Image (tube, helix red, strand yellow):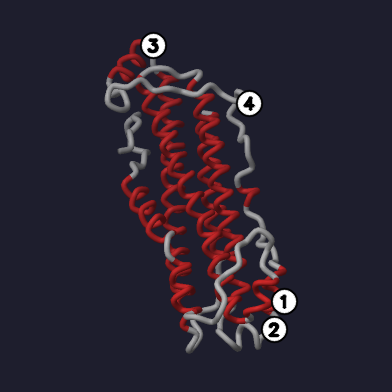
C-alpha cells in the first residue's frame, strides 16, 4: 500500500505540473506584421498543447497504477498462499523469456519520496541580458514586435517542468527498487517492469521539456540580436556562443531555431497514448508494449 501511495503522489505531481504549465506559459497573442513573433507564438501554443497532453496522460497512467497496486495489495491480504501462487502462475514473464534484473535500493529502504518533485516548480527568474532591452520599446516591440521577455520566462517554466519530471522518475524508480526487494514472482516482475517503463517515459518527457528551455533561449537570442545587434551580443550570458552578425532574415533564423523539439514531443504524445492504463476490475498487471 505504501508503494501505491508513492505512485499516487507522482500522479499528484503531474496535476501540479499541469497547474504550473497553465499559470506560467501564457504569452500575448500574435501581433500584426510581426511575422517572426507570430511564428514563435504559434509554435509555443502547440508545445503547450503537447505538454498538457503528456502530463495529463502521465497522470492518468500513474493514477491507474496506484489503483491497481492498492487493489493487488488488498487482494493478497484476502487469499492464502496457494491462491496467490495460482495467480502468479497466470502472469506471463515480462519480455522474451529474459529474467527481470532489479537494482538494489540506494538510500532509505522505504517508500518515501527521495526528491521533492513539485518543489521543482519555481517562479521564472528575470534575465538581465534581455530585461533592459525588453523595457526599451524602440529596441524590441517597436523594431521586430513581440513580448520576448515573457517568451523567455517560458523557457524557465519549461526548465522547472523538466526538473519536475526528472524528480518524479527518480521517486518512482526508488519505490520500485524497494518494492522489488519484498515482492517476488511473475506478477511482481510484471509490475516492476510496468513501473520502470512508466518512469522511463516520464524521464523522456522531462528531457523534452529541458530541450524546450534551450530552444526558447535560442529563439529569444535571435530576436534580441535583430532588435539591438551590438547590445544583444554584449549582454549575452557567459558561455553562450555569439550569434551571426548582420540583420539577415529574422523569420528564417527564428524558424531554424524552432526546429527540433516538436517532433520528439509529438512522438512522446503518441507513445503515451498507446501506453496501457491499468485499473480494471480484476487483479492484474498489464505489460506495456
Q: What residue do we see at 43% from left, 37% from top?
A: 65
Front of the two marks 4 and 2 = 2
Q: Work out how far the residue at label 3 is from the one at label 1, CA to CA, in angstroms.
A: 70 Å
Figure quadrant of residue 130: bottom right
- The correct choice, above or below, for 249 with respect to 175 in the image is below
Q: Work out how far the residue at label 4 is from the one at label 2, CA to CA, in angstroms.
A: 51 Å
Mark closest to the chain's N terminus, 2 or 3: 3
Q: Position of residue 132 (x, y in %)?
A: 72, 76
Figure quadrant of residue 98: top left
Figure quadrant of residue 289: top left
Element class at badge 1:
helix
Q: Please state which of residues 167 and 4 is positioned toward the viewer in this rendering.
A: 167
Mark closest to the chain's N terminus, 3 or 1: 3
- The correct choice, above or below, for 120 with respect to 171 in the image is below
Front of the two marks 2 and 3 = 2
Q: Residue under circle 4?
A: 107
Q: Residue under circle 3?
A: 81
Q: Which mark is residue 136?
A: 2
Q: Position of residue 270 (x, y in %)?
A: 33, 52
**Residues at circles 1 and 2 in contact by the CB criterion of under 8 Å:** yes
Mark closest to the chain's N terminus, 4 or 2: 4
Does residue 271 appear left or right of residue 116 in this picture?
A: left
Q: What residue do we see at 36% from left, 42% from top?
A: 277
Mark closest to the chain's N terminus, 3 or 4: 3
Q: Which mark is residue 132?
A: 1
Front of the two marks 1 and 4 = 1
Q: Position of residue 187 (x, y in %)?
A: 36, 23
Does residue 13 appear left or right of residue 261 in this picture?
A: right
Q: What residue do we see at 63% from left, 73% from top?
A: 149
Front of the two marks 3 and 1 = 1
Amino acid at each position: 500500500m505504501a508503494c501505491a501511495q508513492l505512485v499516487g503522489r507522482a500522479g499528484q505531481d503531474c496535476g501540479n505540473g499541469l497547474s504550473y504549465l497553465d499559470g506560467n506559459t501564457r504569452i500575448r497573442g500574435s501581433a500584426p506584421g510581426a511575422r517572426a513573433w507570430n511564428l514563435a507564438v504559434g509554435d509555443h501554443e502547440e508545445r503547450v498543447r503537447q505538454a498538457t497532453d503528456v502530463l495529463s496522460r502521465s497522470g492518468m497512467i500513474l493514477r491507474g497504477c496506484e489503483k491497481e497496486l492498492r487493489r493487488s495489495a488488498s487482494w493478497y491480504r484476502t487469499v492464502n498462499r496457494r491462491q496467490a501462487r495460482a495467480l502468479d502462475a497466470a502472469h506471463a514473464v515480462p519480455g522474451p523469456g529474459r529474467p527481470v534484473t532489479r537494482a538494489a535500493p540506494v538510500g532509505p529502504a522505504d517508500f518515501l519520496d527521495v526528491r521533492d518533485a513539485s518543489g521543482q516548480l519555481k517562479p521564472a527568474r528575470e534575465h538581465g541580458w534581455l530585461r533592459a532591452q525588453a523595457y526599451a520599446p524602440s529596441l524590441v516591440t517597436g523594431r521586430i514586435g513581440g513580448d520576448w521577455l515573457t517568451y523567455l520566462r517560458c523557457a524557465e517554466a519549461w526548465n522547472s517542468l523538466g526538473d519536475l519530471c526528472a524528480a518524479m522518475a527518480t521517486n518512482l524508480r526508488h519505490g520500485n527498487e524497494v518494492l522489488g526487494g519484498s515482492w517476488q514472482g511473475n506478477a511482481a516482475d510484471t509490475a516492476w517492469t510496468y513501473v520502470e517503463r512508466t518512469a522511463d517515459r516520464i524521464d523522456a518527457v522531462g528531457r523534452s521539456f529541458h530541450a524546450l528551455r534551450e530552444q526558447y533561449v535560442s529563439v529569444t537570442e535571435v530576436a534580441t540580436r535583430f532588435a539591438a545587434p551590438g547590445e544583444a551580443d554584449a549582454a549575452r550570458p557567459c558561455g553562450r556562443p555569439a550569434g551571426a552578425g548582420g540583420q539577415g532574415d529574422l523569420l528564417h533564423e527564428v524558424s531554424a531555431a524552432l526546429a527540433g523539439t516538436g517532433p520528439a514531443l509529438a512522438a512522446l504524445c503518441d507513445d503515451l497514448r498507446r501506453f496501457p492504463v491499468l485499473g480494471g476490475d480484476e487483479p492484474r498487471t498489464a505489460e506495456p508494449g
